[in-house]
Image: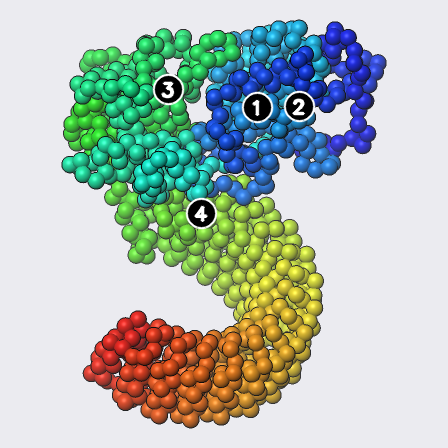
Amino acid sequence: MRKQEVRPGAEAGQGCGSGSPAGQVKALVDLLAGRSSQGSQTPQAPDRPPLGDGSRTQKCQEALLNWVKGSLELGGPPSRLTSLLLVEGLTDLQLKEHDFTQVETTRGGWHPARTIALDRLFLPLSRVSIPPRISITIGVAGVGKTTLVRNFVYLWARGQVGKDFSLVLPLTFRDLNTHEKLSADRLVHSVFPHTGESGLAAAAPSKVLLILDGLDECKMPLDFSNTVACTDPKKEIQVDHLITNIIRGNLFPEVSVWVTSRPNVAGQIPGGLVDRMTEIRGFNEDEIKVCLEEMFPEDHTLSGWVLRQVQADRALYLMCTVPAFCRLAASALAHLSRSKLGPQDAEPWAPRTLCELYSCYFRMALGGDGQEKGKASPRIEQVAHSSRKMVGTLGRLAFHGLVRKKYVFYEQDLKAFGVDLTLVQSALCGCFLQREETLASSTAYCFSHLSLQEYVAAAYYYSASKRAIFDLFTEGGVSWPRLGFLTHFRSAAQRAMQAEDGRLDVFLRFLSGLLSPRVNALLAGSLLAQGEHQGYRAQVAELLQGCLRPNVAVCARAVNILHCLHELQCTELARSVEEAMESGGLAGLTGPQHRAALAYLLQVSDACAQEANLSLCLSRSVLQSLLPQLLYCRSLRLDNNQFQDPVMELLGSVLSGKDCRIQRISLAENQISNKGAKALARSLLVNRSLTALDLRSNSIGPQGAKALADALKINRTLAFLSLQSNEIRDNGARSMAEALATNRTLSVLQFSSNSIGDGGAEALAKALRVNQGLENLDLQSNSISDTGVAALMGALCANQALTSLNLRENSISPEGARELARALRSNSTLKNLDLTANLLHDQGAQAIAVAMRENQALTSLHLQWNFIQAGAAKALGQALQLNRSLTSLDLQENAIGDEGASAVASALKTNATLTALYLQAASIGARGAQALGDALAVNGTLEILDLRGNAIGVAGAKALANALKVNSSLRRLNLQENSLGMDGAICVATALSGNHGLQHINLQGNHIGESGARMISEAIKTNAPSCTVEM
């Protein structure tokens, strides 16, 4: 897309005063032809003139209101059409693939993008930009492009949008196709032929909008490289040449042009000529539900049943994001429900493939559900004749139109293919074909949706291939002798595989689906003969699998073969790969068929929708073949695949793609070094989708860290980065600190086990003083001593963003703890602090405890394995009596003893915020357990108590059991390895009869014995059936 020029500082000349009618006509012609007055300033027309009787604008508005009358939904445009997505050009997927493939591959989701309101569609985006001249709105077939145009025209005619435009000229390519040659002047007058030349004399427009709706329906593709320039508005030239000259600005350079198109055809217009591109999004989940409720307003039971059926099949549900498909599917499903189709006409079975769904629609049309009220349904003996006649005539039109990329037909086309006009006007064909009058007083026909044309074309091909002697794609069919159905199916499959734009993909799916048992049961007696599929089905499945040959990459055509097998109801291949994914046996399936099946599952599997877990199973060659499909996985796990740097070059190319939708990728435990990290870093410079990158347990050094840091200075989407267990050292940490000084999006940085030392910690501390985006910093096991901690705590006094800091397994002594305490007194944002396995001792822990009396932000404090004894435990107990924020306290593997446990227990009698207390291996005996039991009898907030690895004995168990009889807050109790014996365990088990809150209890390692364990387990099941016990 071209960049728009900056608006000039001074506006052009002021508007001309009122002149003679002849002068106004000349001004209009000059404007439309792109000419300006000689020897004077460029004339600027006034704002839209008032709506008087003689106002040309009013006449235009009235004519347009009549034009759109009856074609709009009541209540105005739906909300999704009042706000469009601003997109930056077309992706490869949009340019090269079928509309269905686009929806399936992206799982019905749209790229996160800015939106623009309909009333600002043609206005500048900022104060320093100018309005777009060429605007394109794209959308897949059936998403509502024409509806959008008609709504815009209607709202403009009522003065609600586009108020800058004095004239709006809506044209469709269905209209333009009726002309072989056309001049620019005739193009303008063709919109309102009844007004004539004199109708333009009312006023000179200040601004004109020319709408060209449906570029994908243009009978000739636009060729900008071979079109001769034309600047004469009166010269008649080919219509496609006229359009290219208007878009280039050779004609009507001052006129704004709005083109709508399906995505793959919009690529005909060079991006350098496009000022603004927007996209219509499809339905979201709520809008699908609303659509169904509006279709069946008087039958909520039916709308609810239809919704449940489409939700039951993910593939069909994704396609229902396309409004036209949603309505078609709902009509077919409603017919199923009403007619009770299914085995023995019992409960209606819902279709699970496209062909089943469209066959239901076909049967509905034959049955008369789509006909006018009051007309009787055709008798059974008429069904077969009607269906075969329609498929034989309308199907031939659909098939050859599909081959020629022709989607709009005129009466001469119908005659050329032998289509009876009386048949086209019947109610049966009315379910498939739409009829529309053009401005040239001719009639245009098109299928209600592209997929209906593909279905009817497949039905025709299926029927005709049983008798045709020549390739049907060459239009050389003869009735005798026969070549056979399989030969023709092979030809169709080969053509579909060779079609780079995927236009035959869905056609081949329907053709395959017509051989499935359920479709045969649906259409037997009307379109198909009973059981005729049985002779071909296995051979067609083998033929389709034979199309999956070894290639460098699994292309979309290969994935479509799996869709065809699904339509055929031959799903053994996909099922075997899915089972291998679930069992971890995917590494042994590396053939081309398995790769294609894996690519297919990445699109349609519910499990892969959340996360595609391809750990421990991919080689470089398999990964390389799957690259096109990996683009659209939201979350990708590639751990432990022994990937080296060359693979990172491949993944970097994926992440750099405009189509990339990957949000999270994990590459943990591979063999990535600096070179691989640099390849990933280059992709981060342009990637706009990735939010999480996990590179833990690789071999990335300072240079790789520097490359990633440089990327973070530019990247604005990555929020999570893990470099845990690499080799970045202090130099790598310094590079990352430089990036953090400017980066505002990274919120989680994991640096554990990287030997960054005090130098790295000091650099990060400097960055934290200015960074206000990082929330979680993991510096575990990095040889950080008191010096590094002092720097970090100095930054923490100023930082107001960090909420979690992990400093476990470093070398922090009491001196460093005092710095921590100082920071905790002033910091009001840190919520989680992990100091496990340091060297705090009693002095350091006491300093932190004193600070916790004042701190009201910290919610989780880990002090495990810090040589803490009773003195520090007493200080922490005193802090807990005052602190009102801490919810989790971890004192595991500290010898606090009974004295320390009693001090903490005393605090629990008044503390009302602590919910988790971990006292594993804390040298607690019966006396400490009794103190904790007394506290639990009155405490109403503690939910987790971990006492494993102590020695509370039977006496301690009895004390806790008595507390459990009255306590209602505790949810998890761990008494593992506490020398309870049979008696202590029984005390606890019987106490649960009055406790209805405990959900999990661990009594392992207490020398209970098998018989005792069974007895206690039964007691707990009886007394507390909702409680899980580990024995």
Q: Amino acid at mark 4?
A: Cys
Q: Is residue 602 above or below residue 181?
A: below
Q: Earlier in the sequence, mark 4 or mark 2?
A: 2
Q: Foreground residue, 344 or 991? A: 991
Disc 4 residue crowd, few under 14, some 14–19, many 20+, Cα 10 Å: many
Q: Amino acid at mark 2?
A: Phe
**Residue that mark 3 sits on:** 433
How far apart marks 2 and 1 lie (CA) works out to 11 Å
Between tags 1 and 3, which lies in front? 1
Between tags 3 and 2, which lies in front? 2
- Mark 4 touching mark 2, by CB under 8 A? no
- Mark 4 touching mark 3, by CB under 8 A? no
Number of callouts = 4
Callout 1 secondary element: helix
How far apart marks 3 and 2 lie (CA) works out to 35 Å
Q: Is residue 883 left or right of residue 407?
A: right
Q: Residue at x 19, y 14 (%)?
A: 481
Q: Earlier in the sequence, mark 2 or mark 1?
A: 1
**Residue that mark 4 sits on:** 633
- Mark 1 touching mark 4, by CB under 8 A? no
* Quadrant assignment for the C terminus: bottom left
**Residue that mark 1 sits on:** 153
**Residue that mark 2 sits on:** 165
Q: Residue at x 24, y 79 (%)?
A: 1019
x and y percentages locating residue 833 in the rendered image: 56, 73
Residue 163 shows in the view: yes
